[in-house]
């Protein structure tokens, strides 16, 4: 049985590509297989949800994504029986956005009213985001955290990654060419406030004209504006690279701002491993030296304490007055007092000139001081 082909090439809105447009053609193809070819930057979420329900009611619709598809365009596909995507296509999921129009000179009451209006808008946006996330969860089986994180990243993913996430069922092989960012795509995405897709390429493309050169300048400029701490590679490697700055000691060893994490793994070069190994060796050597120095200091202290104890024991053996002194300082003072009483010794109470020291014993002996008579 031949398929009825319906095309949806443009934005989804209430005036053209909407639920009424799709319902008209689905009713004509009632009981027949339908292929809906979609190439859309998204649009009205409410219309997309209704269109998804209409496809689910029909029961035999295949959505074929062509080129770049985003936002509401991805949501409408979840009502299809099967979702296919061309190999050179791109997919974008992101949080919803609501129109805000506040301008003018406002008094306090009007400002308060504007704040209330914005708070209500925020609650509405959060509710819509949860509804969208639930549709992605139902389709992919992923967790709410995974889906919300993906929507916050607001990045384009290639068809192969969209299939890995479970958003599509089949990748339609092509001529193995990179997706092309045309002037039409650039203007459309810019007007809708969507990020431009960044296409990885081994060779730097050569612009064919001044207009195309301008496109590449715009892409490079927006890439710089949109760059954050997390770097995203949307090539077929499907790898999300994050800069991990919390490993401060490792970063100091490697002399870098942070190490790169790819899919939960840290990749290190041989030079990185050598630097870490040298740092660990230096720390281990320092620890061994500190332990050796501590052991040497303890041995020296123990030797000194033993020597002091031996000296004190020898002093205590001189007399009971020394032994009974309160402490070592007192013992020294007792010994000084004893020495001071010995004739011929220089003490505070008996000082002689150096030249008279050898005669000091007779100088203090009145019996033998005959040479002075």
Image (cartoon, helix red, strand yellow):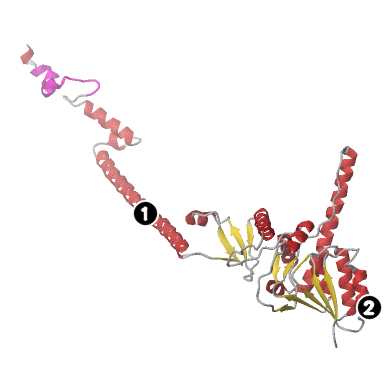
Magenta-colored span: 347-368
The C terminus sits in image quarter: top left
- What is the quadrant of residue 14 in the picture? bottom right
Which mark is on residue 9?
Answer: none
What residue is rendered at 87% in x and 76% in y? 56
**Residue sitting farthest toward the top:** 373
What residue is rendered at 23% in x and 24% in y? 347
**Residue 111 covered by magenta stretch:** no
Task: Give the structural element (helix, strand or loop) at label 2.
Answer: helix
Q: State the residue position of label 1.
A: 289
Task: Give the structural element (helix, strand or loop) at label 1.
Answer: helix
Rendering coords of residue 303 (x, y %): 29, 48
As drawn, 309 above or below 13: above
Between label 1 and label 2, give the one nearer the viewer.
Answer: 2
Question: In the depicted view, which residue is nearer to us: 203 or 263?
Answer: 203
As drawn, 249 above or below 365: below
Question: In the depicted view, which residue is nearer to us: 118 or 190?
Answer: 190
Rendering coords of residue 39 (x, y %): 79, 70
Q: Label 1 to label 2, Cα distance in Å?
A: 86 Å
Q: State the residue position of label 2.
A: 27
- What is the quadrant of residue 103 in the picture? top right
Rendering coords of residue 60 (x, y %): 86, 81
User: Decide: marks 1, 2 in contact (CB < 8 A)?
Assistant: no
The N terminus sits in image quarter: bottom right
Q: Residues within 10 Å of mark 2 (few under 14, many from 20)?
A: few
Which tag, 1 or 2, sits closer to the chain's start?
2
Q: How many marks?
A: 2
Question: In the depicted view, which residue is nearer to us: 193 or 239?
Answer: 193
Question: In the depicted view, which residue is nearer to us: 46 or 370?
Answer: 46
């Amino acid at each position: 049985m031949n398929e009825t082909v319906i095309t949806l090439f443009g934005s989804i809105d209430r005036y053209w590509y909407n639920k009424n447009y799709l319902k008209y053609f689905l009713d004509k193809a009632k009981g027949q297989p339908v292929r809906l070819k979609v190439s859309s930057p998204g649009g009205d979420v409410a219309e997309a949800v209704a269109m998804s329900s209409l496809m689910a009611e029909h029961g035999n619709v295949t959505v074929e994504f062509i080129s770049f598809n985003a936002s509401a365009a991805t949501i409408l596909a979840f009502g299809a029986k099967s979702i296919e995507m061309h190999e050179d296509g791109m997919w974008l999921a992101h949080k919803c956005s609501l129109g805000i129009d506040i301008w003018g000179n406002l008094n306090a009451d009007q400002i308060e009213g504007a704040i209330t209006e914005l708070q209500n808008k925020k609650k509405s946006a959060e509710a819509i985001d949860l509804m969208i996330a639930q549709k992605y969860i139902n389709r992919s089986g992923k967790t709410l955290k995974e889906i919300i994180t993906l929507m916050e990243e607001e990045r384009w993913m290639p068809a192969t990654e969209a299939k890995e996430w479970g958003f599509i069922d089949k990748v339609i092989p092509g001529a193995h060419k990179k997706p092309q960012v045309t002037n039409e795509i650039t203007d459309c995405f810019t007007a809708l406030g969507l990020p431009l897709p960044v296409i990885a390429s081994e060779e730097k493309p050569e612009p064919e004209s001044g207009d195309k050169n301008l496109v590449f300048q715009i892409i490079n400029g927006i890439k710089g504006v949109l760059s954050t701490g997390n770097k995203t590679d949307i090539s077929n490697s499907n790898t999300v690279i994050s800069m991990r700055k919390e490993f401060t000691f490792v970063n100091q060893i490697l002399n870098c701002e942070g190490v790169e994490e790819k899919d939960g793994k840290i990749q290190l070069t041989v030079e990185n491993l050598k630097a870490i190994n040298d740092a660990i060796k230096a720390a281990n050597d320092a620890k061994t030296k500190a332990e050796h120095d501590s052991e040497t200091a303890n041995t020296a202290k123990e030797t000194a304490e033993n020597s002091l104890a031996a000296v004190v024991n020898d002093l205590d053996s001189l007399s009971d007055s020394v032994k009974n002194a309160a402490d070592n300082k007192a013992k020294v003072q007792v010994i000084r007092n004893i020495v001071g009483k010995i004739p011929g010794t220089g003490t505070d109470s008996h000082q002689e000139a150096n030249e008279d020291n050898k005669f000091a014993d007779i100088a203090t002996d009145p019996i033998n001081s005959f040479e002075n008579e």
